[in-house]
Image: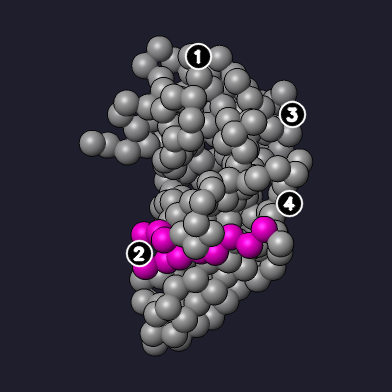
Amino acid sequence: DAGVTQSPTHLIKTRGQQVTLRCSPKSGHDTVSWYQQALGQGPQFIFQYYEEEERQRGNFPDRFSGHQFPNYSSELNVNALLLGDSALYLCASSLKTGGYNEQFFGPGTRLTVL
Amino acid sequence: AQSVTQPDIHITVSEGASLELRCNYSYGATPYLFWYVQSPGQGLQLLLKYFSGDTLVQGIKGFEAEFKRSQSSFNLRKPSVHWSDAAEYFCAVGAISNDYKLSFGAGTTVTVRA
């Protein structure tokens, strides 16, 4: 059973460009959350997708957007990249049942903005 | 708002010695508390969690944590550290009211010396 997978592993972009990161949830999971982890910091919640809709959002600008597909996979898009967007982007999946369900994290995508 | 403070940025411990990592949280109601471990190139792995009940919780890899409401703390301990425990450790708080959106501390890096 594959866990959470993310692609690509590493990415280098320049300021002003746009980037798309991809996440496939663990088998059987229907909810995907995205986190940004800057160097030396803990992960910061960006947003969560369930039933193809954004359900919760953290304190991130509209440059950060996402999408969830019918197969529950998800994309994170960042427009007009800034140097400060350089970070490890983590995807976590879970199964929404109304109670607590453990979030399983992928290995992340390392984004470097030059 | 919920928040987590991990006072120790870096801890060095000898193999076989005991380990304690500190975590202080801020949350108005009963918190849901978590400890995660992150090894280089890996995603976050859940070590243990506290929701209610017994304030001493056992986790994987021989870790345990104690919830102390009076001190707003959730410290992680391990009686005898192995070299493979070298990693970064994150304390996190979540709440049922926001569907367990996780707020992480900045992390503690553990180095194990032979």
Please say whether residue B88 is visible from this viewpoint: no
Q: How many marks on residues?
A: 4
User: In whole angstroms, how far apart are the C-alphas of marks 3 and 2?
Assistant: 38 Å
> In the displayed image of the protein, which residue is found farthest to the front?
B53
Identified at 40% across, 59% down, the residue is B59
Q: Nearer the viewer, residue A102 or B109?
A: A102
What span is in magenta? Answer: B58-69
Tell us which disc is closer to us: 2 or 1: 2
Residue B85, horizontal then vertical, whole percent: 41, 70
Q: Which mark is residue A61?
A: 3
Q: Kindly identify the amino acid type of the residue bearing the numbered disc 4.
A: Ser
User: In whole angstroms, how far apart are the C-alphas of marks 4 and 2?
Assistant: 27 Å
Residue A34, horizontal then vertical, whole percent: 55, 34
Q: Which mark is residue B61?
A: 2
Q: Nearer the viewer, residue B19 or B87?
A: B19
Label 2 neighbour load within 10 Å: few <14, some 14-19, many 20+: few
Above or below residue B93? Residue A7 is above
Q: Is residue B70 left or right of residue B65?
A: right
User: In whole angstroms, how far apart are the C-alphas of marks 1 and 4?
Assistant: 32 Å
**SS at mark 4?**
strand
User: In whole angstroms, how far apart are the C-alphas of marks 1 and 3?
Assistant: 20 Å
Residue B16, horizontal then vertical, whole percent: 39, 85
> In the displayed image of the protein, which residue is found farthest to the left?
A1
Q: Which residue is mark 4?
A: B26
Q: Which residue is mark 1?
A: A52
